[in-house]
Amino acid sequence: MPSSLASGRSESVSSLVAGAPQSRHSRALWLARSTWPKLLAIALVLGVWELVHLSGWKKLVLPGPWAAITNLWGQLHTSLLWRAVGTTSERAAIGFAVAVLIGSVAGALVSRIAPLRAAVGSLITGLQILPSVAWVPFAIVLFGLNTSAIMFVIVMGAAPSVANGLIAGVDYTPPLLLRAGKVMGLRRLQLWRFLILPASLPAYVAGLRQGWAFAFRSLMAGELLVSFANTPSLGVLLSTDQDQSDLTSAISVIIVILVLGIVVHALFGLADRSIRRRWGFDTQV
Amino acid sequence: MTAVVTGQSTALRLTGVGKTYGRGQHAVRALDGISLDARPGEFICLIGASGCGKSTLLSLVAGLEPWTEGEITVAARQTSMMFQEPALFPWLTAAGNVELALRARAVPKAERRRRAAELLELVRLAGFGAKRPHELSGGMRQRVALARALAQDADLLLMDEPFGALDALTRDLLHDELDRVREGRELTVLFVTHNVREAVRLGDRVILLSSRPGRVSGEFAVPIPRPRRIDSAPVAELAATITDRLREEVGRFA
């Protein structure tokens, strides 16, 4: 990616302005084109599911898709599910925000200070590999069975990805742009603000995206294992369904979790695409 | 013509400049004993085979790398540089790129916008300020890079094969632009190229560098009146003379 950042290859004189702005029409077309494979995939999953159900495998506990959808529809009309979604979303938002803050500061420091990088650079990657569930016992002992424990697990899960994203972005700032910036007279802080940080943006957003995935997983692990009464969350709902062997409700909750995760992931996808379009990485020839 | 210029009337002076990369056995001598004087407003072309240290020399003058011996005196107020690639920042518009150069030297905001528009007009890109680099052709990007270099209010412009990646027709047009932009300004230019005709078309003086290490091996005044054309007979004739010398030089190493 970085080498293509500022390549001004020769073009014919006739192609003076490349890349006309996307029209409304083509955007609608793009939406339709990118939606039907997803709908097809969903239909496929439901079909296979129905076949399994019809085959009679685990007939006593495994519901068919229709039963699950009806159950989901029912649960969507209860306040319990929505309160659970609210709690879980709030935790996800706060936990991810803290992780982004810590990850960004750590990433900025590590990328700039060489001894610090030598010391903790590989540690950050190590933390990224470590499944955040491993932090659950530690968090419970340290904080007790409460929200702080869950937040801790989220931050440990997501912050390393955010930090690594920023570090990668800084490392891959094209040297030519750095030379141009220096010749232009940008020094130290200015160089950071106007050159290195914007140049790191694509890698940083990739780090955020990955960080979000890790944060959400950590949150679910945390909610399942650090469950405490009186606060309905998606994790608590799942635990309850497990206790009552209610697979139909559990599937409904899983679908809700899936949708929540995908929606936020898609938002990062939008951010990523908008950067690509503005920078001219989007080659839709 | 004499290259001996004294005191006030020198924009740039190099005295016995040398550059060695590495130390001991692995040391590579890139430049050796380069001496050169540029009058204010003079257009000097550096020409030589690839690997002769032309680009290194520009980096030294720009202060991007330290030199190992000799002395470089830049009398010019402000130096700016253009590269073979436009090196525009892809997250900024054309105007934004120019404005950033103005911002780097603390030009106030309102002034920045006006100056950027003027500079883009100067390089014939009026109305393209809101375009992003990838929406422009290679030639237009190099024009933006020129506007950005000029935005630094430089009186010494270092150009490292800036038109090397462009097609011949676009390059011709940009030669004319460069001549026009320099009109009425005292802009000293140090222009690196390996295209001999381009050097003769543009330069007041063409300096030939030998390879490994880079040394000044010849100097040619270009007494051809402007406006010049790259395909005119006098340009072609002088270019042929210089090419012959360059061939001898390259032949010793190739």
Image (cartoon, coloured by chain):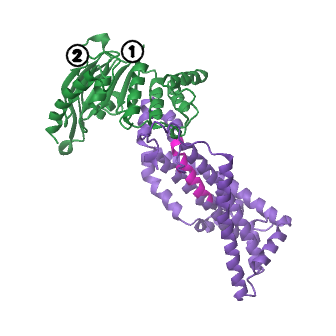
> Which residue has dot 2 on it?
B3
Secondary structure of residue under mark 1:
loop
Query: Toward the viewer: A13 or A135?
Result: A13
Q: Which residue is drawn at 72% across and 84% down?
A: A53
Chain letter, green? B
Q: Which secondary structure lies at badge 2?
A: loop
Q: What stretch is highlighted in magenta?
A: A197-212
Residue matched to label 1: B186
From mark 1 to mark 2, how far is it between C-alphas? 18 Å
Residue B209 falls left or right of residue A35: left
Name the amino acid type tagged 1. Glu
Q: Work out whether residue A186 can be spotted.
A: no
- The reply, left or right, for residue B79 in relation to residue B55 is right
The numbered disc on residue A132 is none
Q: How crowded is mark 1: few (under 14 residues within 10 Å), some or many (20 or more)?
A: some
Q: Is residue B171 above or below residue A27?
A: above
Label 2 crowd bin: few (<14), some (14–19), many (20+), radius 10 Å:
few
Label 2: chain?
A: B
In this view of the protein, can residue B187 be seen by the observer?
A: yes
Q: Mark 1 lies on which chain?
A: B
Q: Where is residue A169 in the image (x, y as percent from the top left)?
A: 49, 48
Q: What chain is the purple one?
A: A
B134, B225: nearer the viewer:
B225
Residue A118: image location, x then y, percent: 42, 52
Image quadrant of residue A179?
top left
Is residue A149 highlighted in magenta? no
Q: Which of marks 1 and 2 is nearer the N terminus?
A: 2
